[in-house]
Image: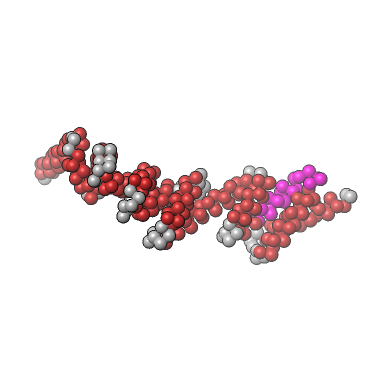
Amino acid sequence: MDKTKNIIFAIVFACILSSCGEYEQLAKSNDFDAKYKAAVNYYEGKNYTRAIQLFENLIMYYHGKENAENISWYYAQCLLAEKDYYSAGYQFKSFYKRFPYSERAEDALYLAADCKYHESPDYYLDQKLTKEAIQEYESFVDRYPQSLHIPEINTHLDELRNKLMLKDYDIAYNYFLTESYNAAYVSFQAFLNNYPDTELKEQAMFYMLASSYEYGINSQENKMKERLQQVVNDFDRFASTFRDSKYFAQAQAYYTKAKAAIAKIEAKK
């Protein structure tokens, strides 16, 4: 049994070596037609690593020639299959620019945007790529408003915009946690203006109120009354919107303390 296994292993290993040898010879040869056929076969056989290497070698040679469009398309598809989204997105965008009248142009522009979507990181990280993905999708929709890709794009846009919303909330909340109360108040206020229908509205309004109180109560006395009056105003809005909120008791406590502090200031006059 062991002898049989060894024989089978030796045969398989020899085939691998032979295959590698043939590939190396092909990669170094000047037979570009053979390289092209082999690259397509590797692509269709899902051997993307070898296909990529050959297509990279073919791009310059076939520039402006008959197979240039196919090579550019296959190369981008291989990169996408390997989840190299940065390189794939660049190649799909390049394809669109080089072959704007191709029947694949629409799909190329869509896939370029989709690659940017896949590059978008978790919400707590820098959202530069998320914003770029949104811009890419919006540009595609402007160019192809009747595209069959629109429903999927709308789903992805909702997801990307939700990331931006969570990031903005996270920034404001971190200001609150680090006791940067004025920055927190301004950030929560901007958050509510930018996302009036957010599911985080209740929390944002409460922490804006809390930030307002902490900022006001720690202000210089000549500015304290005005700032604490803002707490009273913010509580009125919060109470009218979220009367049954789990934060209501805490919000009311800020309101009560703000009113007491205002009364104390007025009593000194």
Residue at point 62%, 46% (across, down): 175
Q: Nearer the viewer, residue 219 or 143?
A: 143
Question: Does the magenta-highlighted stretch encompass residue 18?
Answer: no
| Pick the front one: 216 or 190 | 190
Image coords of residue 118 (percent x, y): 41, 49
Point out the stretch of residues depicted in magenta: 206-223
The picture places residue 43, in percent across and down from the top left corner, at: 24, 48
Please tell me which residue lies in front, 42 or 6.
42
Residue 4 in the figure: left or right of residue 89:
left
- Relative to 36, 11 lies left or right: left
Give me the residue at 56% from left, 60% from top.
199
Farthest residue to the top: give it.
Answer: 28
Which color scheme does this rendered protein use?
A: secondary structure
Quarter location, residue 15? top left
Residue 14's spot in the image, x, y percent?
13, 39
Residue located 29% across and 45% down the image: 72
Q: How many marks?
A: 0
Q: Residue 88: x and y, percent?
A: 35, 45
| Residue pictured at 50% horizontal, 46% vertical | 127
Asked if residue 221 lies in the magenta stretch, the reply is yes
Is the stretch drawn in magenta largely helix, strand or loop?
helix
**Which residue is farthest right?**
269
Q: Is residue 229 above or below residue 82?
A: below
